[in-house]
Amino acid sequence: MRMRFGWMLAGAVVVGIGLGSSRGAMASIGPVLGDPSGSSLGYPAGDCTLGFAFTVNTAYTVNYLGVWDATGELEEGHPVAIWDTSAIPVQLVTGTVVEPGLEQGQYDWVAVPATTLLPGNYIIGAFYHYTPDGVLNVTAPASVDPAITYTSSQFDYSAGLVYPGDPFGTFPYVAGPNFATEVTPEPATLTLLGAGLLALRVRRRKA
């Protein structure tokens, strides 16, 4: 089955125009996919689950699930899940991204129970209604965590969140769902933070 999208050229919508600079930053989120630079903005021509297949190269702990946000405010909540690719796919982690929520870069996020993905093949998908929130057809992901290899975009027409088992060959890279790990501050950062708190404490004592 072929996926149909109503595409609006991104010449009029330069997506990468600094959505991240105007949104609340969550420094602890380390996303797998970086912010896309933009190509063409599209809206699903029917209810569907859209996402991508990927390979985990080294064990990766998922702490957040996300959805690309074209306008800075999602119109609806989006259930997101990650499945393995066994003969009967197993849903490993799920959550629903809503407004208002955690925001970083061009994505909105929801915290989920820590789930470790061992090396192997997986698929992530998010459910989209007919038109409220768009997705982005991009030439290639802006950046990909070295622990992950992006394989292909995936979809399935559905009335709710389902395993998107069909390759979306027309658009090999689609900015939609995303996932992330919890980033631990580097020791130097912790040292600077500790020094700052100590200085603040000394100032308060002198006052």
Image (cartoon, helix red, strand yellow):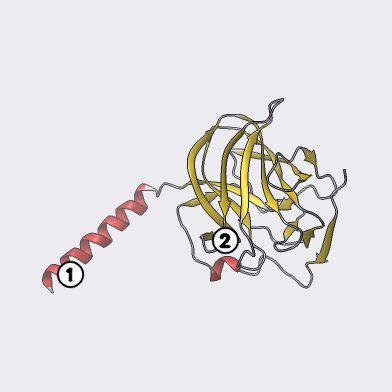
Q: Earlier in the sequence, mark 1 or mark 2?
A: 2
Q: Residue visible at 55% across and 63% down?
A: 99
Question: Does residue 193 sit above or below 11 in this rendering?
Answer: above
Kind of element beneath mark 1: helix
Q: Are marks 1 and 2 in contact (CB under 8 Å)?
A: no
Point out the residue furthest to the top here.
Answer: 87
Q: Which residue is mark 1?
A: 203
Whole-number angstrom distance, CA of label 1 to CA of label 2: 35 Å
Q: Which residue is mark 2?
A: 105
Residue closest to the eye, 204 or 71: 71
Q: Is residue 108 visible?
A: yes
Please give the label number shown on residue 158: none
Q: Residue visible at 74% across and 58% down?
A: 136
Q: Residues within 10 Å of mark 1 (few under 14, many from 20)?
A: few
The amino acid on which the numbered mark 1 sits, given as a three-letter code, is Arg
Q: Nearer the viewer, mark 1 or mark 2?
A: 2
Point out the residue furthest to the right here.
Answer: 2
Residue closest to the eye, 195 or 101: 101
The amino acid on which the numbered mark 2 sits, given as a three-letter code, is Gly
* Residue 41 % position (x, y): 76, 63
Q: Quadrant of residue 107?
A: bottom right
Q: Residues within 10 Å of mark 2 (few under 14, many from 20)?
A: many
Q: Is residue 33 visible?
A: no
Q: Residue visible at 49% across and 62% down?
A: 25
* Residue 71 % position (x, y): 65, 68
* Residue 104 % position (x, y): 53, 60
Residue closest to the eye, 70 or 39: 70
Kind of element beneath mark 2: loop
Describe residue 171's horizontal placement relative to residue 37 as left or right.
Answer: right
Quadrant placement of the N terminus: top right
